[in-house]
Image: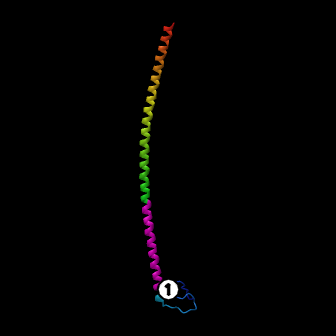
Amino acid sequence: MAPQNFTGVEGVSGHNGEKKRGSSRDVLAALEKRVIRLEESLNEDKETQDGEESRSELIRTIEGKIREEVENLLGEMYERLDGRDNSLEAEVTSMKEEIKELKTELLGHNTQKLGAAE
C-alpha cells in the first residue's frame, strides 16, 4: 500500500519522503478537532437557517395582516365614496328639479308680462 499524504493535517509533514512529526495519535486527534469544528460550523449554520426561516415566517404573517388591513380600509373607503356618490346624485337631481320649476315660473312671469303689455 502506498503511503498517504496528510497535507494540511496538524502534526504531519506534507511530503511522502519526509519523516512524520507526529504519531498516528496526533493525526487522529487533529482529524477529530477538524470534525468537531465542522460539526460546530454545521450547527451554527443550521441555527442561522432556523432563525432566518423564523423571521421569514414572521414577515409572511405580518405581510398577510397588512394586506388584510389594507383591503378592509379600501372596502370602507369604497363604501364611503358610494354613499357620497349617492348623496351627490340625489342633490343634483334635486337641483335639476328646482331649475325646472324656476324655468316654469320664469316662463309664467314672462307670459304674464307679455299679456299685460298687450
Residue 2 x/y as whole percent: 57, 88
For residue 18, say whether it is visible.
yes
Report if residue 22 lies within the magenta region: no
Look at mark 1 in the image and give the residue it sits on: 10
**Location of residue 44 with respect to 5 vertically, above or below:** above
Q: Secondary structure at mark 1?
A: loop
Place of residue 16 in the rendered image (x, y in percent of width and height, measured from the top left):
57, 89
Q: Residue at x 41, y 42 (%)?
A: 76
Q: Between 88 and 74, which is closer to the camera in this rendering?
A: 88
Rendered location of residue 29, percent (x, y): 45, 85
Instruction: Name above or below for residue 86 compared with residue 37.
Output: above
Q: Residue at x 46, y 20 (%)?
A: 102
Give the image quarter of residue 19: bottom right
The magenta span reads 28-56
User: Count the marks: how many?
Assistant: 1
Q: Is residue 48 above or below residue 14?
A: above
Residue at 44% in and 29% down: 91
Q: Is residue 33 magenta?
A: yes
What residue is at 44 percent from the left and 75 percent from the top?
Answer: 40
Image vertical order of residue 67 relative to residue 34, above or below: above
